Amino acid sequence: MTRTSTQVAVVGGGPAGLMASHLLHRAGIETVVLDHREVREIETTHRAGILERDSVRLLTETGVYSPGAERVLTHGDRHGGIDLRFGGRSHRVDFERLVGASVWLYPQTEVFSDLHRARTRDGGDLRYGVRDVQVHDVLGTPRVTFTGADGSPHEVTAELVVGADGSRSACRDLVEPRTRSSREYPFAWFGILCEAPKSAPELVYTRSDRGFALISQRTESVQRMYFQCDPGEDPGAWSDARIWDELQTRLAGEDGFSLVEGPVIDRSVLPFRSFVQTPVRHGNLLLAGDAAHTVPPTGAKGLNLALADVRVLAEVVERALGKKDPDLLDEYADRALARVWKAQHFSYWMTTMLHRSASDTDFDEARQLGELNSLVSSEAGSTYLAEGYTGWPAR
Ligand code: DHB
């Protein structure tokens, strides 16, 4: 058994775990990051692509990049608004004009790679491809045991453990839940990557009689698109032609808008759930990101919320370790959960405003169009969307 000790053991080496490790390192706090996945697997799992204003700041203002080499700014695309499309027409919501903010299209896989590069550059202790990760004694002096990538047994002793191990979190199971709030939706998203030029300069969130569709982008030659589907849908059962037909039908309208088609190079069905578990602290274990909460993808809040969590977490952990006062850790839950519930509402709201469900009545359909019409024709309504989409100020 190889034994090491550190100040904070971070379980989960995705963007949340790596950002936590990066921020703690900046505060002079040692971490060890553990993940059962290989780096390559994380780098090639396609996830969301929109960063709120403060997520971009967190990347550019905390030394993730060398000065002048801020990859999110040089390789990402700034979007000053989105299109809401319904009734066959697009309505632009102009974030810049409404709230003086924008978002950046920069895929989560790139955020991961940038953080991984930064932690490696700064000598971070990162262990990917480890097995049998188990967290012990979080009410006393925590230990994490695991089998190293070479098959040898290890134990890391730490003052604190951060559980950033995603929506199927094992750390979460160590916390006796006080509340577990969730909502299931009767649909999922069919997500594709295709080789084609952009069909639109910004995101197009579409409500159609056949259900929701979202047009997003990746590069000049690769695009990301989604459409609402049945949760049990088999992505392999869809030919390219059928996928394009479904997307074109949902986007069609009197303005003649149509998508530029190309070969579909990746397809998957994304699960859909709203979930929050409390408490997010159990002794010396703190949960962050998807381990503590998941949002449906409409509005792209998942990654942004995870980054907002770990920003607060790093600040609170720095103070608690510095003053040797574990009671100070309670501030994490209070501050993080306030934002979590704003994002839960926002994601739920955008989802229900744009998706169709089999049980919808004529009333539901007309009410949904009434909501969209009042949103795009009201300065107050559009501003509410713009504020939530670009992200509430950190507190
Ligand atoms: C993307 C994903 C989302 O869930 C969203 O709301 C916007 C964009 C994306 O993958 O580009």
Image (cartoon, rainbow, N blue to C red):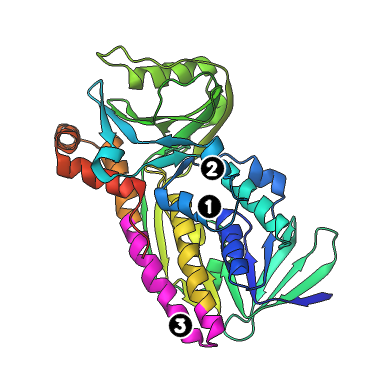
Q: Which residue is mark 3?
A: 328
Q: Which residue is mark 2?
A: 72
Q: Which of the two residues, 101 or 305, is positioned nearer the viewer here?
A: 101
Q: Residues within 10 Å of mark 3 (few under 14, many from 20)?
A: some
Q: Residue furthest front?
A: 68
- Residue 249, quarter of picture: top left
Whole-percent x, y for residue 35 in the image = 68, 58
Q: Magenta stretch: residue 325 in it?
A: yes
Q: Which of the two residues, 143 or 96, is positioned nearer the viewer here?
A: 96
Asked if 341 appears above or below 79 in the picture, the reply is below
Whole-percent x, y for residue 78 in the image = 43, 36
Q: Are marks 1 and 3 in contact (CB under 8 Å)?
A: no
Q: Residue at x 30, y 39 (%)?
A: 96
Q: Amino acid at mark 1?
A: Leu
Q: Magenta stretch: residue 275 in it?
A: no
- Which labelled disc corresponds to residue 59? 1
Look at the image and give the residue range highlighted in magenta: 319-342
Quarter of the rendered structure image containing ligand 1: top left
Mark pair 1, 3: CA separation:
26 Å
Whole-percent x, y for residue 153 in the image = 82, 69
Q: In terms of sequence position, does the residue under pointer 1 or pointer 2 come before the other?
A: 1
**Quadrant occupied by the C terminus:** bottom left
Q: Residues within 10 Å of mark 2 (few under 14, many from 20)?
A: many
